[in-house]
Structure formats: structure tokens, C-alpha cells
Amino acid sequence: MNFRKYIILGCVAAAMGVSSCVDDLNVEPENATTKTELTSKEDYLGLIARAYGGLVFEGGVQVKDEGRAIYTRLIWNLEELGTDEVVLGDNWKDAGVPEVKANNAGPDNRMLYEAFSRLNYQIALTNSVLKAIDGASAYGITDAQIKEFKAEMRVLRALSYYHMIDIFGKGPWVTTNHPIGAIPPTYSREKLFEAVTADLADAIPDVPKAAEQLYGRVSREAARMLLAKLYINAEVYLGPGNGMWQEAADQLKEIQKSIAWDPSIEYKYLFCATNDKYVGNGEILWAVPQDANTMQTYGGTTYLSVGAYNSKVNTLPYGCAGDQWAGPRVALKLSQALKSTDRRRLIFEGKLHEDITPADMQDWPENGGGFMCVKYVFTPEDNYTNAGGLNTAATAFNSTDYPLFRLADAYLMLAECEKHGATGCDGLARFNDVRLRAGAAPVGSYTLDDLLAERMCELYWEGHRRSDLIRFGKYTGSDYTWPWKSGVYEGAAIAEYRSLYAIPVAFEETLGQNPGYPTGLSFSVEEE
């Protein structure tokens, strides 16, 4: 079965049981022609795939610019803007962007509203499948398949809760036991962490292994990676002294048992239009599928390619013939970290200069400040440099799958766990595996600072940086600064309370507000 087809058609049954997670959010079907009754196997598979498609498609939340409110784009912006990896110039003034990139977003920030709404909607989609899926047995879907689909939906739901815990710290805990329309209980960060990790751990044994799973669906190894992500951040979520380093390592070691490390992989091919060959039972543990013809999105790798390309620069070698958006640029710290001999340095320099001064923020000409990130391209592996212009995209949409989790990340996490006392990690060997594949020299030892630097070089622009900086104690305060930290060219301290984003005003009455943020601000979803 080609599951990609069902993701494409996944809006077939999106209205079935999709409800608001909190009373403030009005969740509506995306399409007036959406079916409201499941009457075939195709309908059920469409509903399942719609939950997967929620990571890549528009719709479902109240916004004027739906392309800006796509799951992958929102999470990436909140995890990358305002860090030492990305600078977004003042030539982009989309609502919510200036505050997020300056690390001073408040409860009335539009991007925060869109992100919290998107997370709630995605949770509602997964719950709609869990409520309806038992009925699929009447249409040729076996009990064993139903069991697997239920486990996968719980993993998808846990992904959104992971982002909610990491970004906002608290939220509504919604399962299939909550009546439609009822306001669910608000869980603290600690309680939400406990509920999500318990549910995810319980679901994992029923998720098919990567070697047996269909492309486009989550595997057991990907689910373990998600659980390891939660565990490795336990001291952030639960407080100092509550580390779960061994628990994280145990999950990572299970991944290592079943998916082999391939030192021959060329890093750049993991982010090109044929990277699906590495998805699932390979380097990319979990990816969000994209297709320029059938799965079009203004989020994901479309945003990270055409969105990050300078309109004054020739981007034909990367498969892009025009429509460059001149958005995110390579931050100075990132460019300095990636040495010229590092195979991971996917950066275009040309006439651009490395530093981004205040004058450079207004425009991004071909001789302006900020190198161009070309990590994500439109071209396939067999014609990566677009010789002859044969693989030039006809539209802005990219076919490169968006990588959520990679094996290299798991290896660096094992090295990190060992530094915090976990056993059986072979941390130095795993650390050097990652370095050697990149063409960097092996080392005889490493520190936590070395790990944070290596995570930047390996995982830049993959949506992990803010979380990493917080876990390593480098995000807030002034011990570690970078140009444009807090929106200041010289870099300035970030207040400690900003390690959590604000609860958006629209949800404040139900959920309360995070410490440090003002309350009682006004906000309208109709305003831009």
C-alpha cells in the first residue's frame, strides 16, 4: 500500500470527531465537501492519513495567512529564530516575527497563538482517529492493523505534546475519554510530562519496527527517539535533580540495535529531493513527506529552501528558478562553527559577507550581510548541482522530505547521556562517528561545550537549537551571547522566565499564564 497516496487524500474524513482541545479554539473542517461519515476502507485510511498530513498541510485553525501557520514552519520558527543559528532580517515583518526573533514575544504575539492553536488542532486530529478507528474492522482493516494505527496515533499525539511541553510548558491533557466540547483539565509541565511519557511508553511496543513499516508512517524507532527527547530534557521540564539520562540512553540504545550507522552517507544528500531513500529504516528516523506536485506546503523544506534563498543570488544550482523569499539567513556563530573542511558546511557565500550588521537587517542584496543557507535544496541526489538545469523546480514547492529526527542526533544524545552518568552509551565512539562522517578529526575526549558545538554543526536548521541551548544552560542570561541575541547586534541577556514562551492571550483564561509575562492583554484573531 502506498501510504503517500492516503496522506494526499487525507482530508477525506477530517471532520469526524475533530473537536476543540480548549473552549477558546474554534476547530472547523478545512473543506466544505469533507465527509462526515466513514463508509469505506478508503475513508478510514484517509482519516488516519489526515492526522499525518496535519504536520504538513494548511487549515484547521483561525488565521488569515494559512501558509504561515503550518505545523513544521511554526515549530521551526519558535525553535530557531532568536538563536545562534539563524538571523531573520527586518525585511520580514510578518505578524509575530519581530518579537520572536528578538526573544521578547509576549502573550499577544500572533505566532504564539498560531502555534498553540496548531498543536491543539493536531491533538484533536489524532484523537478523532482513536475514537473512530474501531469501526474500520467492518471495512477490511484487520484488528492487528487497527492496533498498530492506534499506537501510531498515540505517538503522533505525543509529538504535539512534546512540543507543547517544550515550548509552552503546560496545556490541556486531552484523550478520547474527554467529551466533545468539554473543557479538559489543564496539566502543569510536570504532570503533562508524566502523562505523555507514560502513554508513549505504553504505545511503543505496538508500533511496527522501521524495517516493517510503510514509508510515511512512524516507526517504533522513531517513537523511541521521541521518548528519548522527552527524557533527555527531564531536568528542564521537571527541575534540577530530576534527570532521566539513563532512561533516555536506554531508548537510544534500542534504536542503535536495529538501525545501522552508515558512515558512507554524504551529509548533503540527506536534505535533497530524493532524501526519502534515507527515511524510516535509515538515517532519517522520522520525516514529514513532501511532494512538489501532490503534497504542496509553504512550511517544511519549502520554507527552508526558497524561503531562505536570497532573491539577488543565482539559485539555479539548487533547483530554484525564482520566487526566492529572502528570509532566514545564516547567523555568524553558525558560519564560524562550520569550518571550510567540514562536509556539513552547506552555505553559499558569493559576494555576501558573514556578519550581519544593523544596516544589513533592512535589505539582503547580493553583497549584503548574512550567508545563504543551502542545506535544503530542490535537486535530486543524482543531479545534486542541477547540471543543465534539468531539475529546476517549476514552483516554490519542494519535494525534499522534512527530517524530524535523525540517527546522528541519537548518537550525539548518547554521548550527552554518558556525560551525565548514563552507562552503556559508548559516548566517545558515537561522538566520533558523527565527526568522522563529516570529515572532522576524531577526538580523545569531549566536554558538554564540545557537544553543544557539535550539535550545531550536525543539526543546524533542523528545529532543535532553542531546546538545546536551554538544556545546556546557554539560552537565558548573558554567560553565552551571540550577535542579535535579544534583538541587539552586540547581544544581550535573555530573562530567565523566557525559557518558556508565553501562553497566548486567547487561551489565558482557561490555562493561566506562565510566570514573568503580563496578563490581561487584548488580542483578536481577525487582526494582522
Image (spheres, rainbow, N blue to C red):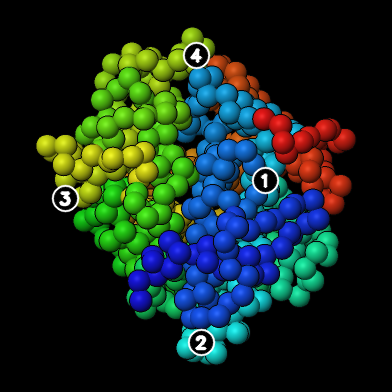
Q: Between marks 2 and 1, how big is the CA–CA gap?
A: 34 Å
Residue bearing mark 3: 382
Residue bearing mark 4: 362
- Sequence-wise, the earlier of marks 2 and 4 is 2
In the image, what residue occupies the spot 40% across and 45% down? 301
Residue bearing mark 1: 62
The quadrant holding residue 121 is: bottom right
- Sequence-wise, the earlier of marks 3 and 1 is 1
Q: Position of residue 495 (x, y in %)?
A: 72, 31
Q: What numbered label is drawn on residue 215?
A: none
Q: Residues within 10 Å of mark 3 (few under 14, many from 20)?
A: few
Q: Between marks 2 and 4, how big is the CA–CA gap?
A: 58 Å
Left or right of residue 95, residue 461 in this image: left
Q: Secondary structure at mark 2?
A: helix
The quadrant holding residue 232 is: bottom right
Q: Between marks 4 and 3, how big is the CA–CA gap?
A: 38 Å
In-front residue for pair 298/421: 298
Residue 133, relative to residue 511: is it above or below? below
